[in-house]
Image (cartoon, coloured by chain):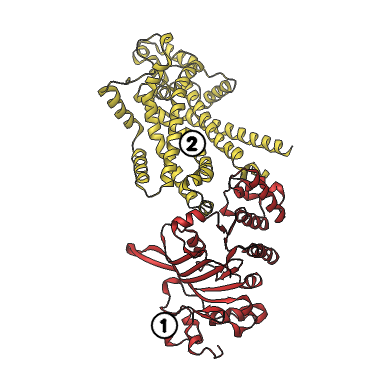
Chain colours: A yellow, B red
């Protein structure tokens, strides 16, 4: 009973947090867009078309789009619709935002999921190895790689890979998510995978350094801990020490970090999708921003915020479920 | 004749440190340590807190940190205890009872850790027997280290040693943070281990407690063993040998609670020769030389004053 109650309390608290976050993010995005010098009319109707319209027609259009209303009123009417599940119509695509987002999100999730899993597995493995064999050549190599990668902008690495595999070796496509000129029905999973390889590689390579360095630090702490010393004193080999104690102790913080890093991969995907002309959420965000497509941008931002929040929440939940020190103490929730 | 399980002679453990200007400094935390433990004997190494006694345990077990180096002779059952040999024996014949719960994996259940993951019925049965013996409920097996109380945790830590068939048990500071009653009970567990035939080496700062349960006491001062005495020697000040031991005796509550002036010197600024020189009431120029550790009246002492006038009242 008590546990039920505390879980209810926890869920309520998290829900409130989520609502506050969404509210704050939507407001900041909205008013930043309002402060942007890009005029939605000019961007979406076109300079030439706008020039041929009479002042009256322009005013009418403005009223139709609602851009003549005071910003606060605009925000409130957007929020009202959004809460009811109505995201509006994209000015760029002339389609309901839901359908645009649905399509882009699917592409992006494909990319992000693989990049996230690869960078996680690679990062944790490298971090554990570096931490266990601290000071060795292996450790120095891994650390050097991480520092180098951390200092490398994702888009630059994307360009390098593009140049190498796409332009010189010509083994991988240079962009888009499906082959150019192919009927949507004919596109196979293999085609999509081939187009996603380079963006996934870029995101994995750049995502790895953070998780590796953190896992390495944690692993070093564990290797120096009293319980590892005692394990050695009880005759365990290095492998047994790792398997019996090191792995479980490092996995929790590493996974937590990995879930919290969803935001970074999400952020990185904006630039990487741009470089590879990959039609995902990141590209949609850039297009919506530059095109002053407020409904689309708001929806992209909201969904991204939800993802990041979801990642952090999962990390938090993992601790509650996996760590016995938190799981078994009632006060923790 | 009881077999000598452990014999340590001239043990030296130093740390390599880098001081200002990246100069390498050797810090000898243990300078000259001699201990002998026989079968069925409980020996307490007594020294003040922070004097590096724990390193003795780690040194014997071959688990010193990478920046520490060790010199001297360690014999286990008459033969040198090489790195390979101790690797084979530790956790089986030579067991460590650690100081605190931080030596248990926080994410593993207690029972699993005592069994070291072994699942055979024989091991499980032994665990149940141990729990009965140490008055631990069976449910404790399924608990995590953070759920244990102070007194319970000591019994758990002792159980980890008892799961094996140890010939040598090394207990590192088993009693701090316990009230007197509990501390005594813990020491009695070690006494039992000795009575069953194992050699027990207890490293502690609590002389009084050691005297109640051990057979022999080795006094450790500023990195050096200054005296080895039978516990019965402590009945009278005259039967003790080293002036520092006598000072400790006088500091016991029942003998007047008199504390000795001054502090133990820090390893970095130790005088050459006898480390007790600056505080010793009997010091002479001879003390500035290396002082040998010699057998006297069933014990051992490292003091030149004692040999210049062995019959003099000191």
- Chain bearing mark 2: A
- 1 and 2 marks on the same chain: no
Please provide percent x and percent y for residue A201.
37, 29
Q: Which dot, 1 or 2, sits closer to the camera? A: 1
Judge whether B69 appears above or below A6 on screen.
Answer: below
Please provide percent x and percent y for residue B115.
61, 48
Q: Secondary structure at mark 2?
A: helix
Judge whether A29 appears above or below A124 on screen.
Answer: above
* Mark 2 crowd level (few <14, some 14–19, many ≥20, 10 Å Cα): many
Quadrant location of residue B153? bottom right
In-image side of A83 versus A32 (left or right): right
Query: Disc 1 and disc 2: Cα gap in Å?
Result: 62 Å
- Chain bearing mark 1: B
Picture residue at 59% right of the left edge, 39% below the top: A322
- Point out the residue furthest to the right here: A1
Q: Secondary structure at mark 1?
A: helix
Judge whether B97 appears above or below B232 on screen.
Answer: above
In-image side of B49 versus B232 (left or right): left
- The answer to whether any part of residue B143 appears in the image is no
Quadrant location of residue A183? top left
In-image side of B135 versus B40 (left or right): right
In front of the other: A333 or B142 = B142
Instruction: Assign the N terminus of chain B to one quadrant of the image.
Output: bottom right
- Point out the residue furthest to the front here: B1
* Mark 1 crowd level (few <14, some 14–19, many ≥20, 10 Å Cα): some
Please provide percent x and percent y for residue A178.
38, 16
Q: Which residue is mark 1?
A: B288
Q: Which residue is mark 2?
A: A258
Instruction: Assign the C terminus of chain B to one quadrant of the image.
Output: bottom right
In front of the other: A242 or B257 = A242
């Amino acid at each position: 009973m008590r546990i039920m109650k505390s879980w209810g309390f926890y869920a309520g608290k998290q829900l409130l947090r989520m609502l506050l976050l969404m509210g704050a993010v939507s407001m900041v995005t909205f008013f930043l867009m309002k402060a942007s010098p890009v005029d939605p009319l000019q961007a979406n109707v076109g300079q030439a078309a706008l020039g041929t319209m009479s002042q009256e027609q322009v005013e009418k259009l403005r009223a139709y789009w609602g851009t003549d209303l005071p910003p606060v009123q605009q925000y409130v009417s957007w929020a009202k619709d959004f809460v009811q599940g109505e995201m509006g119509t994209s000015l760029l695509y002339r389609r309901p935002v839901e359908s645009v987002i649905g399509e882009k999100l699917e592409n992006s999730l494909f990319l992000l999921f693989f990049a996230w899993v690869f960078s996680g597995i690679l990062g944790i493995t490298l971090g554990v190895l570096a931490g266990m064999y601290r000071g060795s050549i292996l450790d120095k190599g891994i650390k050097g790689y991480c520092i180098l990668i951390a200092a490398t902008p994702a888009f630059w690495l994307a360009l390098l890979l593009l140049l190498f595999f796409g332009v010189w070796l010509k083994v991988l496509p240079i962009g888009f998510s499906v082959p150019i000129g192919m009927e949507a029905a004919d596109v196979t999973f293999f085609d999509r995978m081939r187009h996603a390889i380079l963006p996934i590689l870029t995101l994995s390579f750049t995502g790895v350094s953070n998780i590796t360095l953190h896992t390495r630090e944690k692993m070093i702490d564990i290797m120096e801990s009293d319980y590892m010393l005692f394990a050695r004193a009880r005759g365990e080999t290095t492998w047994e020490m790792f398997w019996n104690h090191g792995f479980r102790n490092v996995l929790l913080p590493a996974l937590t970090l990995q879930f919290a890093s969803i935001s970074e991969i999400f952020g990185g995907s904006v630039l990487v999708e741009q470089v590879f002309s990959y039609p995902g959420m990141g590209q949609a965000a850039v297009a919506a921003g530059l095109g002053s497509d407020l409904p689309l941008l708001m929806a992209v931002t909201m969904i991204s915020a939800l993802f990041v929040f979801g990642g952090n929440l999962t990390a938090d939940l993992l601790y509650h479920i996996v760590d016995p020190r938190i799981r078994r103490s009632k006060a923790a929730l | 004749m009881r077999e000598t399980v452990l014999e340590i002679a001239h043990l030296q453990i130093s740390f390599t440190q880098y001081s200002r200007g990246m100069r390498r400094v050797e810090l000898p935390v243990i300078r000259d340590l001699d201990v002998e433990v026989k079968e069925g004997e409980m020996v307490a190494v007594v020294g003040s807190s922070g004097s590096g006694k724990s390193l003795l345990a780690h040194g014997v077990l071959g688990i010193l940190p990478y920046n520490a180096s060790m010199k001297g002779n360690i014999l286990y059952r008459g033969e040198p205890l090489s790195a390979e040999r101790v690797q084979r024996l530790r956790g089986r014949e030579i067991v460590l009872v650690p100081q605190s719960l931080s030596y248990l994996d926080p994410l593993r259940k207690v029972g699993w850790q005592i069994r070291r993951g072994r699942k055979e019925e024989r091991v499980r049965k032994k665990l149940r027997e141990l729990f009965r013996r140490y008055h631990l409920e069976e449910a404790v097996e399924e608990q995590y280290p953070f759920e244990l109380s102070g007194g319970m945790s000591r019994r758990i830590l002792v159980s980890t040693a008892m799961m094996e068939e140890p010939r040598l048990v090394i207990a590192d500071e088993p009693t701090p943070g316990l009230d007197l009653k509990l501390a005594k009970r813990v020491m009695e567990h070690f006494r039992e281990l000795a009575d069953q035939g194992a050699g027990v080496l207890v490293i502690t700062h609590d002389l009084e407690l050691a005297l109640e349960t051990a057979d022999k006491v080795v006094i450790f001062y500023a990195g050096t063993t200054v005296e080895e005495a039978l516990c019965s020697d402590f009945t009278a000040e005259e039967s003790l040998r080293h002036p520092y031991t006598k000072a400790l005796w006088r500091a016991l509550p029942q003998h007047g609670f008199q504390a000795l002036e001054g502090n133990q010197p820090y390893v970095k600024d130790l005088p050459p020769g006898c480390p007790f020189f600056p505080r010793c009431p009997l010091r002479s120029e001879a003390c500035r030389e290396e002082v040998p550790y010699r057998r006297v009246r069933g014990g051992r002492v490292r003091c030149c004053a004692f040999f210049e006038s062995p019959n003099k009242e000191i």
